[in-house]
Image (spheres, rainbow, N blue to C red):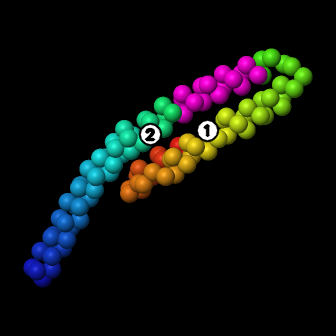
Amino acid sequence: MKIFFVLIFILSSVFFLNACASDDEIADELIDYHNNEWIPIHVMKERDASYAMKELMNVLNEFGEDYEEEAIALDESDIIPLADKVIDRYESIQIKSRKVKKPNKMQI
């Protein structure tokens, strides 16, 4: 009976120590994801999207005969490829923990 309690104590201790260690690994992975993946993608997205959105707003404010076609062409040539590029970069990130995958999927 005494061996049974010692065994349960040892197993619970190992489980508890393993849980604490994995939190540090998850935190490190989250910090690495934010600094090395999310920030560069966000900077690229803001830089390229701001230019495309300015062009789109200029086209929409002109109200010419074919402004709708110009807006669609601009959308197809600049905005949609940018969105595809951003999604591809987010999908190509290799993530180990489920807690870091969740914010990455939210970005997609």
Residue bearing the label numbered 1 = 82
Please check the rendered image and state whether residue 107 is part of the magenta-colored stretch, yes or no: no
Q: Residue at x 41, y 54 (%)?
A: 95
Badge 2 element: helix
Percent of width and height locating residue 35: 37, 38
- The image quadrant where one finds the N terminus is bottom left
User: Compared to 8, does 77 lie above or below?
Assistant: above
Q: In the image, which residues are magenta?
A: 45-59
Percent of width and height locating residue 17: 20, 60
**Residue 34 falls left or right of residue 78:** left
Callout 2, which amino acid?
Trp
Which one is in front in this view, the residue at disc 2 or the one at disc 1?
Answer: 1
Percent of width and height locating residue 104: 48, 47
Residue 81 quadrant: top right
Query: Is residue 102 visible from the viewing direction of this image?
Result: no
Q: Residue furthest top?
A: 62
Q: Residue at x 86, y 19 (%)?
A: 64
Q: What label does residue 38 carry, if any?
A: 2
User: Compared to 6, does 61 lie above or below?
Assistant: above
Percent of width and height locating residue 103: 47, 46
Categorize mark 1 by other alpha carbons within 10 Å: few (<14), some (14-19), many (20+).
some
Report the Cα–Cα distance between label 2 and label 1. Answer: 16 Å
| Residue sitting nearer the eye, 105 or 85 | 85
Badge 1 element: helix
**Residue 58 falls left or right of residue 28:** right
